[in-house]
Amino acid sequence: MLSGDEHCKAPARDSFSLPELSHDELSLLAFLYTSALDRDLPERHLHALLVAADKYDVAFLRRACEARLAAAVEPRNVLRTLEVAELSSSAVFRERAMDTVLQHAEQVVFSPEYDEFAVRNAALCVEITRALLAKMSMSTTVRSTDKSDPHHA
């Protein structure tokens, strides 16, 4: 029951329309009533729900969205994923996205979307650059250690 339902003009069993609510807001309302996410929700709706879950501190919704979205992270959507992770303060989701960027760095950084992403998200680009350099440095260190190891074949 919604707070204030006792003052509602529509009978409890009747259906009613809420045209002033967006699809995302209706999805949030549906989740609060059912504790289930629609399987067919598009990625952008899941993004909006994750941000709403953060805003309204709905931990169960947050975890459900993070799990669904983390499973779908790939190079084509990773930049938007990073933005949403930043907006929703989702460390788990952010880490998954950053790992994807590092695994597919060339594809992501040279994508048409990266230029616009960089303009909107300078701080995230700095993090990406530092993470890529750290990864390169680590692989260089491992290679030089392997070469100096007399037992290495």
Image (cartoon, rainbow, N blue to C red):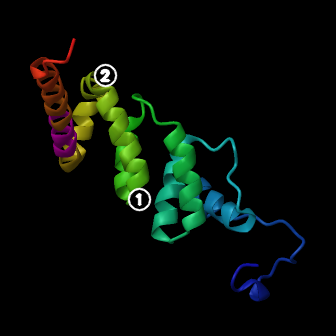
Residue shown at 46% from the left, 59% from the top: 51
Examine the structure image and report whether residue 61 is included in the region drawn in magenta.
no
Which one is nearer the viewer's eye here, 119 or 141? 141
Q: Is residue 144 visible?
A: yes
Residue beneath label 1, please?
A: 88
For residue 2, which quarter of the picture?
bottom right
Q: Amino acid at mark 1?
A: Ser
Q: Is residue 79 visible?
A: no
Examine the structure image and report whether residue 126 is included in the region drawn in magenta.
yes
Instruction: Please tell me whether the stretch drawn in magenta is mainly helix, strand or loop.
Output: helix
Chain part drawn in magenta: 125-133
Q: Alpha-carbon neighbours of circle 2 within 10 Å: few (<14), some, or many (≥20)?
A: some
Question: Which image quadrant: the C terminus?
Answer: top left
Residue beneath label 2, please?
A: 107
Question: Which image quadrant: the N terminus?
Answer: bottom right
Residue shown at 38% from the left, 55% from the top: 91
Compute the Cα span from label 1 to label 2.
Answer: 25 Å
Residue shown at 50% from the left, 54% from the top: 48
Q: Secondary structure at mark 2?
A: helix
- Residue 52 in the image: state x and y as whole percent: 50, 63
Q: Secondary structure at mark 1?
A: loop
Q: Amino acid at mark 2?
A: Gln
